[in-house]
């Protein structure tokens, strides 16, 4: 069960947020065009679903090494150097993700402290602002998995994991 969750958790979350985004947008377009009426809550749902979609998708891309990268150098180096470059890239990304969690968590804390709410949905902004530290925390989790995999591959003399497409 954990292996299935590990492999598909982000994909299912992405599906939920993407479906919510598309369905709400479609309803709002119909309401605007047919009934000359739109709501502020529809725009907010689409905006925040998109934000969660982006951050969860970034974590999924880390898992599958699907982020955009300049990999021309990888074509000219051996497997050990390639693995070291992947490890170096993951460490740099880990430092950036740790800083981002730290700084974004401060924003969530301030929102919690002052009780800010969204304009249309009248929900606590904590739920929406938490997308950034949640996304970076997922990235950190996936980076740890990637580092462990790359170190094990390097120690065993195997080729580094090159990555897969996000959706096959």
Image: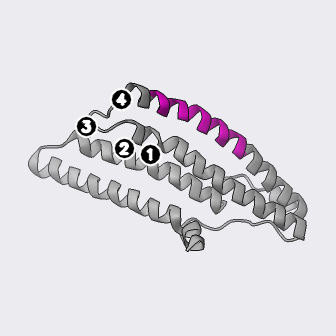
Residue 141 has which mark?
none
Magenta span includes 102: yes
Classed neighbour count for the residue bearing mark 2: other residues with Cα under 10 Å, few (<14), some (14–19), many (≥20): some
Residue segment shown in magenta: 93-110
For marks 4 and 1, the one nearer the N-term is: 1
* Of the two numbered discs 2 and 3 in the rendering, the one whose residue sits closer to the viewer: 3
Horizontal and vertical percent for residue 107? 50, 30
User: How far apart are the alpha carbons under marks 2 and 3?
Assistant: 12 Å
Q: Is residue 156 above or below residue 22?
A: below
* Of the two numbered discs 4 and 1 in the rendering, the one whose residue sits closer to the viewer: 4
Residue 29 seen in render? yes
Q: Which residue is mark 2?
A: 47
Q: Determine the image quadrant of residue 97.
A: top right
Q: Which residue is mark 3?
A: 120
Q: Which residue is mark 1?
A: 51
Q: Mark 1 touching mark 2, by CB under 8 A?
A: yes
Question: In what element is the residue under mark 1?
Answer: helix
Horizontal and vertical percent for residue 109? 49, 31
Q: Which residue is mark 4?
A: 116
User: How far apart are the alpha carbons under marks 4 and 1?
Assistant: 18 Å
For marks 1 and 3, the one nearer the N-term is: 1
Classed neighbour count for the residue bearing mark 1: other residues with Cα under 10 Å, few (<14), some (14–19), many (≥20): some
Question: In what element is the residue under mark 3?
Answer: loop
Q: Mark 1 touching mark 3, by CB under 8 A?
A: no
At a point 85% along the width and 55% down the height, the residue shown is 84
């Amino acid at each position: 069960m954990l292996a299935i969750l590990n492999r598909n958790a982000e994909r299912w979350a992405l599906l939920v947020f993407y479906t919510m985004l598309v369905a709400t947008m479609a309803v709002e377009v119909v309401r605007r065009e047919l009934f000359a009426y739109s709501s502020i809550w529809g725009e907010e749902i689409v905006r925040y679903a998109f934000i969660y979609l982006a951050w969860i998708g970034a974590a999924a891309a880390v898992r599958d090494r699907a982020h955009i990268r300049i990999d021309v150098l990888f074509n000219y180096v051996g497997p050990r150097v390639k693995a070291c470059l992947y490890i170096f890239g993951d460490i740099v990304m880990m430092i950036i993700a740790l800083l981002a969690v730290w700084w974004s968590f401060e924003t969530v804390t301030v929102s919690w402290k002052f009780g800010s709410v969204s304009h249309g949905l009248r929900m606590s902004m904590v739920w929406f602002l938490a997308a950034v530290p949640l996304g970076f925390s997922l990235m950190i989790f996936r980076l740890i998995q990637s580092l462990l995999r790359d170190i094990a591959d390097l120690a065993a003399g195997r080729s580094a994991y090159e990555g897969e497409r996000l959706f096959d």
